[in-house]
């Protein structure tokens, strides 16, 4: 009797694993044929559009063992001629303070920070200002990903380098 129960249990396990394997095989071709749309560089301070763009650009720099969920900082542009210039400036200053607090406090190894925004010069300004608060080699093991225009690369790299963080630059395109 025990032999019959054991045989039935083995048969059930094999049947379930075959079902799971079959369902996985039928789903894969559908996923492979789905076209991948690139998210264009957003214009302006649309935070939802920037979130989607940043997710897309950060994906190649994720590591399933480390750096899975980056702390992303959207640096808003400030247009002094805009009607809501005061609000834009308030948001910029608040984000600068957030970045300064994080860098000044210290970042745990294995953490990934990302930075982007419509005004690459402003992104560079925030990074330069905030990374003055990092001591030499205090961010070893931290990954910094910056999405900006190519003309800001050297300036941003120079600001990040003394901290010891791994620096990845992604050109906005």
Image (cartoon, grey):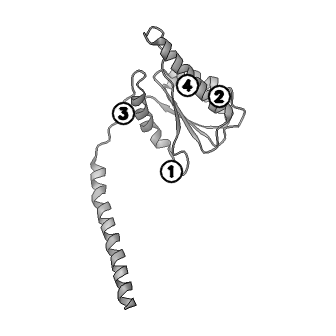
Asked whether disc 2 touches disc 4, contact meaning CB atoms under 8 Å apart, the reply is no
- For residue 141, above or below residue 46: below
- The answer to which of 161 and 48 lies nearer the viewer is 48
In the displayed structure, does residue 116 sit left or right of residue 107? left
The circle on residue 131 is 2
Sequence-first tag of 2 and 4: 4
Give the spatial CA distance, label 2 vs label 4.
14 Å
Q: Which residue is mark 1?
A: 64
- The answer to which of 36 and 86 lies nearer the viewer is 86
Q: Which residue is mark 3?
A: 39
Give the spatial CA distance, label 2 vs label 3.
29 Å
Image quadrant holding the C terminus, namely top left
Residue 163 appears in the figure: yes
- For residue 138, above or below residue 17: above
Sequence-first tag of 1 and 4: 1
Residue at 56% from the left image edge and 48% from the top image edge: 66
- The answer to which of 138 and 94 lies nearer the viewer is 94
Report which quarter residue 82 is drawn in. top left
Give the spatial CA distance, label 4 vs label 3.
24 Å
Report which quarter residue 50 is drawn in. top left
Query: Dot 4 surroundings within 10 Å: few (below 14), some, or many (20 or more)?
Result: some
Residue 146, horizontal then vertical, whole percent: 53, 31
Q: Which residue is mark 4?
A: 95
Query: Dot 2 surroundings within 10 Å: few (below 14), some, or many (20 or more)?
Result: many
Asked whether disc 1 touches disc 4, contact meaning CB atoms under 8 Å apart, the reply is no
């Amino acid at each position: 009797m025990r032999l019959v129960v054991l045989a039935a249990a083995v048969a059930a396990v094999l049947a379930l694993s075959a079902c799971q394997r079959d369902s996985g095989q039928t789903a894969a071709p559908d996923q492979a044929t789905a076209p991948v749309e690139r998210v264009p560089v957003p214009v302006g301070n649309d935070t939802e559009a920037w979130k989607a763009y940043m997710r897309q650009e950060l994906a190649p720099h994720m590591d399933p063992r480390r750096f899975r969920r980056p702390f992303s900082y959207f640096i808003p542009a400030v247009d002094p001629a805009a009607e809501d210039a005061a609000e834009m400036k308030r948001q910029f200053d608040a984000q600068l303070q957030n970045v300064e607090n994080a860098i000044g406090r210290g970042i745990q190894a294995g953490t990934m920070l990302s930075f982007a925004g419509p005004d690459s010069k402003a992104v560079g300004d925030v990074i330069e200002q905030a990374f003055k608060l990092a001591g030499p080699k205090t961010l070893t093991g931290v990954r910094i990903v910056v999405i900006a225009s190519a003309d800001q690369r050297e300036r941003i790299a120079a600001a990040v380098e003394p901290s010891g963080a791994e620096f990845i630059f992604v050109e906005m395109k």
